[in-house]
Amino acid sequence: MSSTIYPYLSEEKLKIAEKESAAKELSWLLGSFEETFLALKNGIEECHALFAPAHRGSTLVLSSPRSESIKGHITRVGSQIIKGTINLRLRTHAPLNLMISPISSDAKTKIDGLSLSSLSTLCKLLDQSLECLESTRFPVADTGAEQTATSLDINSDSSHIFSQLRLLHSSFQESLLILKGSDPPSKSGPSDKTSHYAKAWHLEPLQSDLFIPELPSTLALDISIRECSLLLTIRVLEPCSQSQTLSSIFLTGIGVQRRLEHDEMNHEFLYRGEMVRVKEKCQIESSADPCLLSCAAKLQVLERSVLGAMEALRTVLDCEEEE
């Protein structure tokens, strides 16, 4: 079967016909994106609803494997932890039972809960994505028989929509990075960031009055996001000015007493105005948060939809993918 056009067109008329055909195809594709963007908006709103204060949130279990070092549970609503219980049985610290409460133990006044800055940033990214969708303009089709698609400002519309798609793709990628969490710190030294958009534990310590009893100065507690779960890190601190006793040096030398090895044992940190060392470090991941899992699954679908739209636009425009 031949695909030759009949009647035959001259080379000049063929080029004009090809341009008109490409313009019509591009105009149709840009018009079809209106439905795609509406589906993206609905998906983003569903993700945003998972972090609404009215949502019931998630109660997650904390349990250290093969030991009783850390046990308890915490409840997350939106981007805050509103309540929880943490039982600590550490090797270098006295047993302690902490309760997370948004009520100050001294003033008995209601204060903000334990805020997760990573999830706050995620909500801002979702808001920016909605604003990006609402600011997108689409070409208005002309129903006139004599008016062709070339009369529309196709180049301007395609550039605008493609830039919006790139912004959405970047926002979805950042959001998925937040839910995944950052890579472990390098062996060369501790990182100044513990998770995506979250400062290190010693730069932004948690409020002591969020806990009942108040968090002692010898303990540092940090909560971040990793693989759609909450990562709880407990550190036992000691001042750098505190020198080891003679008996401790002797017991360490003969092997009776050993230092607890971890990735921060040879580093010093400025914590609450004092240089400290990390004597003991324990990390534990909570059970998977169903809301974070649902949000990650929805964001992956939205990201694939945006990539498909970008690929379709590149194909019609006959341009190569940028690195």
Image: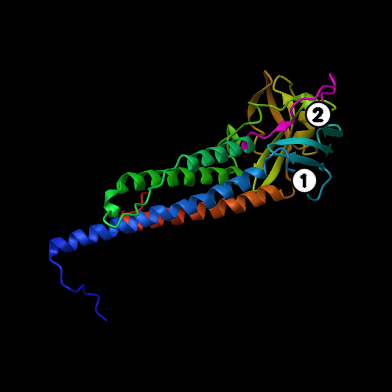
Q: Position of residue 7 (x, y in %)?
A: 17, 73
| Disc 1 from disc 2: Cα separation | 18 Å
Q: Which of the two residues, 76 or 246, is positioned nearer the viewer here?
A: 76
* Residue annotated with mark 2: 211
| Quadrant of image for the N terminus | bottom left
Callout 2: 10 Å neighbours few (<14), some, many (20+)? Answer: many
Callout 1 secondary element: strand
Q: Are marks 1 and 2 in contact (CB under 8 Å)?
A: no
Q: Which of the two residues, 283 or 115, is positioned nearer the viewer here?
A: 115
Residue sitting at x 70%, y 37%: 223
Q: Is residue 165 shown above or below 84?
A: below
Queried whether the magenta region covers residue 115, the answer comes back as yes
Question: On the picture, is 267 further left or further right than 66?
Answer: left
Question: On the picture, is 156 further left or further right than 15?
Answer: right
Q: What type of secondary structure mainly makes up the magenta span?
A: loop
Q: How many marks?
A: 2
Res. 248 visible in picture: yes
Q: Position of residue 108 (x, y in %)?
A: 85, 22
Q: Position of residue 237 (x, y in %)?
A: 74, 28
Queried whether the magenta region covers residue 38, the answer comes back as no
* Residue annotated with mark 1: 60
Query: What label does residue 133 carry, if any?
Result: none
Callout 1: 10 Å neighbours few (<14), some, many (20+)? Answer: many
Residue sitting at x 23%, y 61%: 18
Callout 2 secondary element: strand
The range drawn in magenta is: 103-118
Residue sitting at x 67%, y 41%: 51
Answer with mark 1 or mark 2, whichever residue precedes in sequence: 1
- Tag 2: amino acid: Phe
Which quarter of the figure has residue 16?
A: bottom left
Residue that sits furthest to the bottom in the current view: 1
